[in-house]
Amino acid sequence: MTRARILSGREVAEAVYGELRKRLQALPFVPSLRVIRLGENPASVSYVRLKERRARELGLRSQVEAYPEDYPEEALLERIGVLNRDEGVDGILVQLPLPPHIRVERVLEAISPQKDVDGFHPVNVGRLWSGGEGLFPCTPLGVVRLLRHYGVDLRGKEVVVLGRSNIVGKPLAALLLREDATPTLAHSKTASLPEVVRRAEVLVVAVGRPHLVRKEWVRPGAVVVDVGVNRVGERLLGDVHPEVAEVASALTPVPGGVGPMTVAMLMANTVKAALLRRHGPPR
Ligand code: GUN
């Protein structure tokens, strides 16, 4: 039996960092990233630390602002306003999830679209869907970049995205359209879900349910991208069961697949935001 090729996000992320280092050396300024975190959600603490470390390794200016769990919404909005006006700040990211007393939409809409390195502001969402230039979400960008690196041609392909979140599924569908793929957005209420998933030439799973996708769901020879990061005890498990490696032609590992790509694309977005703010979109 042949086993799926492993699509290493760590390897591709290194290639992205190599390109970014070259671009940064040619810039007369150092792009800067500000990350805001509320509370002590262990996953958020760990993700933010990772982003901070990578930004510094790359030579970006990077600062984390950590506030208590009960930080008021108005204070957060005010802080974002200050950072929006700060000429020395290129990218602003508010780590999600936020505590329940904070209205996420208000926060995401408060961030200047020019500094919105997460690509979650409605202006950037609109630009993504209408085909314009803007800042787009990091995980979907990472998925497309990873596939491109390994020579997976998306043009005309039936790509099934399992999961319809604002962070991954929906923006990924828009990016896939921009790549001339034919995306299907499937989710927990999709009728005959295993059959729909089995149609995929390229399958992307982002639902947050450990080992949900079994080998019977996967079309033989499909390329499978596992966005899931599920902490189960001490282990990190993907949304795709490891047995899928027996039928897929290629598969991303967890960890070491999409995760490193998300961080790499955040760094790329920070550089892009810095350039867009100074020079506007390319003509
Ligand atoms: N939490 C999980 N993924 C993300 C992300 O891409 N951006 C932010 N800000 N928070 C997240």
Image (cartoon, rainbow, N blue to C red):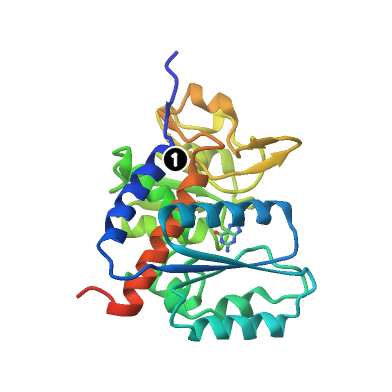
Label 1 environment density (alpha carbons within 10 Å; few <14, some 14–19, many ≥20): many
Residue for point 46% across, 59% down: 266
Task: Please tell me whether residue 97 is drawn above or below residue 188 in the rendered image.
Answer: below
Circle 1 SS class = helix
Farthest residue toward the left?
283
Farthest residue toward the top?
1
- Quadrant, the C terminus: bottom left
Picture coordinates of residue 232, whole percent (x, y): 73, 37
Left or right of 234 on screen, residue 119: left
Task: Please tell me whether residue 208 is drawn above or below residue 33 in the rendered image.
Answer: above
Q: Is mark 1 within 8 Å of ligand 1?
A: no
Q: Is residue 199 visible?
A: no
Picture coordinates of residue 192, whole percent (x, y): 59, 43
Q: Which residue is mark 1?
A: 9
Q: Is residue 153 visible?
A: yes
Residue 220, quarter of the rendered image: top left
- Quadrant, the N terminus: top left
Left or right of 263 on screen, residue 181: left
Q: Ligand 1 shows up in which quadrant of the image? A: bottom right
